[in-house]
Image: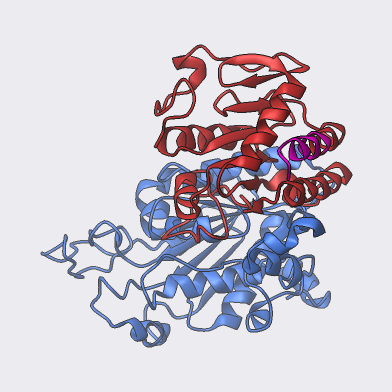
């Protein structure tokens, strides 16, 4: 894929809707220094979303898509969940996998792309919710870490199965009560970021999406490390305001509150990852 | 509604339902009959010139500048539309679009009938739409609307269209323009 695919034939341009013309004229293709600061001035790769009003996941999507260093050569693999409702609106190649299989699919795609396009840099990113990453897909997630697949895994943790009515997930906090978990969760939240470290990830970060620039930095670091070294894992807290009973404009406050608690910024990197990040910083790419 | 063609409202592929197959190279398919390309072109031009709200639905293969041929085809599609006096509504994205599409500005292969109903289109041309999505869309249109469908296909054709012209490249599109001009003269336009 190349960003040239968005080049519209002049003879038919006037019939194309403005949002598609903008993808050619105002999107930030071919610029590895693109980032969240471009958001107010450039065409976003996410035209609109089908999530609830004020959903922090939609903010996470915008920041991540704005931070991809190589969007024209990026493939996103997703899985069932709230996130999967957004993918039809994204101007990138995305693959919807069977629930929980996302890391296995991404591994295959990455390997084939490396074989098919040895002279090109192709980034494969998994974007899935907590149910897909930690419950139903834990096997595939960890196996891809064990195999040292060069993919970036991003988990949108809303601590609940949100779009099916509020069942507890492995990442629900102990004691949390949801509509379909009336007694409250009996067990602790799975420390997946720690498991990712133990399973061989070279870069792991845990944060909320309250700070766009921090999200950009983490995403870029994770992608650059995955490109050269091995698997990376980013854990983002994107609370389900609907299931925890907040208003549409409360999402940011909720994330800021948890920034100081259980989602305090946490980052881990191996020596090889540090070297890559340092080099990219010197090149001005992070 | 859904009265056109031998398979009319059947939502099944005509190949399965009516044993209609794509035309051999150099020929065209009109309903369930294999005819000469020129005859099919004349009928296609006549349908587009005489039915209400004729519209061309260009797909990504002509909308985007993939290569020189795509560029040239886009120019010719534009000329066809101008010669026919037809509207152009692009099919630029195959993904289902929710919560709704704007049927005045786009057509989506997963629910093409919405655009046809909304604009009251009685004749249309598919050009530059990838085969599998053209097949899906043409079946839905045949089953759900009374729109006369014409497929200008670069490959083997689409048996689900009322008129199928296969192997349509720049030379053939230029020929189609000449045929349209002739038919126009015959119709006194």
- Whole-percent x, y for residue A284 in the image: 80, 78
Query: Residue at 56% across / 53% down in the picture?
Result: A200
Residue drawn at point x = 57 percent, y = 37 percent? B133
Q: Which of the two residues, A171 or A160, is positioned nearer the viewer here?
A: A160
Q: Tell me the quarter of the picture where residue A31 sits.
A: bottom right
Q: Position of residue B139 (x, y in %)?
A: 49, 32
Label the magenta part by its dominant secondary structure.
Answer: helix
**Residue B184 percent coordinates (x, y):** 75, 40
Judging by colour alone, the chain drawn in blue in this rendered image is A
* Front residue (pair A170, B151): B151
- Colour of chain B, in one word, is red
Which residue is pictured at 72% across the width and 49% down the height? B81
The region drawn magenta spans B178-189
User: Quadrant of residue A237 in the image?
Assistant: bottom left
Does residue B57 belong to the magenta stretch? no
Tell whether A39 sits left or right of A209. right
Q: Which quadrant of the figure has residue A283?
A: bottom right
Q: Is residue A206 something that shows in the picture?
A: no
């Amino acid at each position: 894929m190349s960003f040239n695919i968005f080049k519209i034939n002049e003879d038919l341009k006037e019939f194309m809707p403005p949002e598609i013309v903008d993808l050619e004229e105002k999107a930030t293709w071919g610029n590895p220094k693109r980032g969240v600061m471009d958001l107010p001035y450039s065409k976003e790769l996410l035209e609109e979303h089908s999530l609830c009003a004020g959903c922090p996941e939609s903010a996470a999507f915008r920041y991540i898509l704005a931070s991809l260093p190589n969007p024209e050569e990026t493939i996103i693999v997703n899985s069932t969940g709230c996130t999967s409702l957004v993918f039809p609106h994204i101007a990138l190649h995305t693959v919807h996998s069977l629930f929980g299989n996302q890391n296995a699919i991404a591994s295959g795609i990455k390997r084939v792309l490396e074989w098919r396009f040895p002279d090109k840099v192709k980034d494969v990113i998994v974007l899935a919710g907590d149910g897909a990453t930690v419950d139903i897909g834990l096997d595939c997630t960890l196996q891809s870490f064990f195999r040292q697949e060069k993919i970036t895994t991003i988990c949108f943790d809303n601590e609940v199965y949100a779009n099916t009515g509020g069942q507890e997930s492995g990442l629900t906090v102990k004691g949390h009560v949801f509509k379909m978990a009336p007694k409250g969760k009996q067990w602790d939240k799975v420390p997946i970021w720690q498991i990712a470290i133990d399973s061989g990830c070279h870069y792991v970060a845990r944060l909320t999406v309250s700070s766009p620039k921090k999200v950009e930095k983490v995403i870029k670091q994770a992608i650059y490390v995955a490109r050269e070294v091995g698997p990376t894992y980013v854990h983002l807290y994107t609370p389900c305001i609907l299931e925890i009973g907040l208003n549409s404009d409360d999402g940011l406050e909720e994330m800021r509150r948890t920034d100081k608690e259980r989602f305090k910024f946490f980052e881990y990197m191996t020596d090889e990852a540090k070297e890559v990040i340092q080099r990219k910083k010197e090149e001005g790419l992070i | 509604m859904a009265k056109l063609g031998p398979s009319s409202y059947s939502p099944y592929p005509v190949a399965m339902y009516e044993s209609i197959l794509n035309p051999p190279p150099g020929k065209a398919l009109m309903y369930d009959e294999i005819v000469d390309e020129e005859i099919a072109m004349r009928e296609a031009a006549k349908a587009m010139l005489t039915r209400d709200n004729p519209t061309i639905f260009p797909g990504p293969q002509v909308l985007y500048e993939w290569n020189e041929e795509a560029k040239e085809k886009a120019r010719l599609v534009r000329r066809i539309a101008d010669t026919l006096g037809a509207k152009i509504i692009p099919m630029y994205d195959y993904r289902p679009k929710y919560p709704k599409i704007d049927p005045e500005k786009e057509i989506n292969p997963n629910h093409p009938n919405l655009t046809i109903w909304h604009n009251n289109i009685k004749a249309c041309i598919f050009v530059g739409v990838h085969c599998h999505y053209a097949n899906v869309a043409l079946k839905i249109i045949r089953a759900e609307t009374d729109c006369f469908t014409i497929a200008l296909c670069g490959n083997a054709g689409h048996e689900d269209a009322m008129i199928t012209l296969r192997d349509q490249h720049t030379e053939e599109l230029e020929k189609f323009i000449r045929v349209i001009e002739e038919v126009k003269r015959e119709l006194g336009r």
